[in-house]
Image (cartoon, helix red, strand yellow):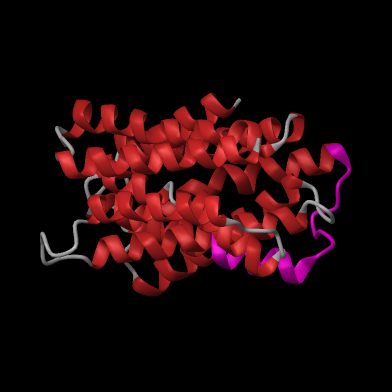
Amino acid sequence: MMIIATICFSLMAVMVKFLSDFPVMELVFFRNIPIMLFIPLILKNKKISFWGNNRPLLLFRNFLSGFGIITYYYTILAMILTDAVTIRQLSPIFMIFLSSLFLREEIGVKKITIFILAFLGTLLVVKPGFHLDLYPAVIALFGSISTAGSHVAIRSLRLTDHPLVIINYSGYSLGLVSIGILLWQGNFIIPDALSLFFLVLMGLVSLVGQLAVIIAYQRVPIKLVSIYLYLQIIFVALLGVLFFKEIPDLFSIFGASLIIISGYLNYKLKN
């Protein structure tokens, strides 16, 4: 299930890059359409309340998740695809410190060392001082932190709310906000047949990826399967070369390797 999720998220990133002519908010809106259509039907079939129990935390998690998705889509369009996805995969490392701050989980010297290793990898990917435009990379870092915060919120919500309720809240909140911003800006682009196909497919693979993650997390502890998400860096690097002729430089390759190694060490430490 985690490998399926990783493939889906990789394909989603490639389709976002392919649809670079569309506004970010339009991509975000189409990404959430399948959630808005299918998740309520599943909830109704399972006789689960749409509204959830811990509504304040659900709404706060929606804000963090929404900011993470919007910044992720922006950085995919603004950066080399592999670099954007690599910085995104820092979120599990940021979760170490956020869990320590808000969930009072113990943090030791080994975890701090893992964070430093991941940070060094990030420096190699971002390459501060090597180019003038650091803005997308900084946005990517903030998005990764926001995504980490949303996952920490999920860890608290697991005690009160069904995972499908969390997805439903996120899908409707982000979908309605994105279409509202699109209408306010007046920059909605009517897609042609091919673009519409990829927009719909992007939303579907995103939904399948989220459901696959939930299935995996329901069957075994997160610490046993989260390591597979780092495969996304490898998949996206290969797809970026294949479809967009984007070849990461040696600094990015080495930095991504350090981030993958830090993820593996964090996995081993949890075990």
Q: Residue at point 34% right, 69% down?
A: 186
Please provide percent x and percent y for residue 211. 64, 35
Farthest residue in the bottom direction? Answer: 184
Residue 43 position, x and y percent, is 79, 43
Magenta stretch holds residue 192: no
Which quadrant of the view contains residue 149? bottom right
The residue nearer to you, when weighing 158 against 243, is: 158
Highlighted magenta segment, given as a residue range: 46-65
Q: Per the image, is 63 magenta? A: yes
Q: Quadrant of the N terminus?
A: top right
> Would you place residue 57 above or below residue 148 in this image?
below
Residue 176 vertical placement versus 269 (above, below):
below
Q: Is residue 50 left or right of residue 246?
A: right
Image quarter hosting the C terminus: top right
Q: Position of residue 82 (x, y in %)?
A: 28, 41
**Left or right: 100, with 70 as reference point:** right
Quarter of the image where one finds residue 99: bottom right
Residue 37 visible from this viewpoint: yes
Residue at 29% from the left image edge and 40% from the top image edge:
192
Q: Residue at x 61, y 54 (%)?
A: 151
Residue 129: x %, y % from top left? 13, 65
Residue that sits furthest to the left in the current view: 131
The answer to whether 245 appears left or right of 24 in the picture is left
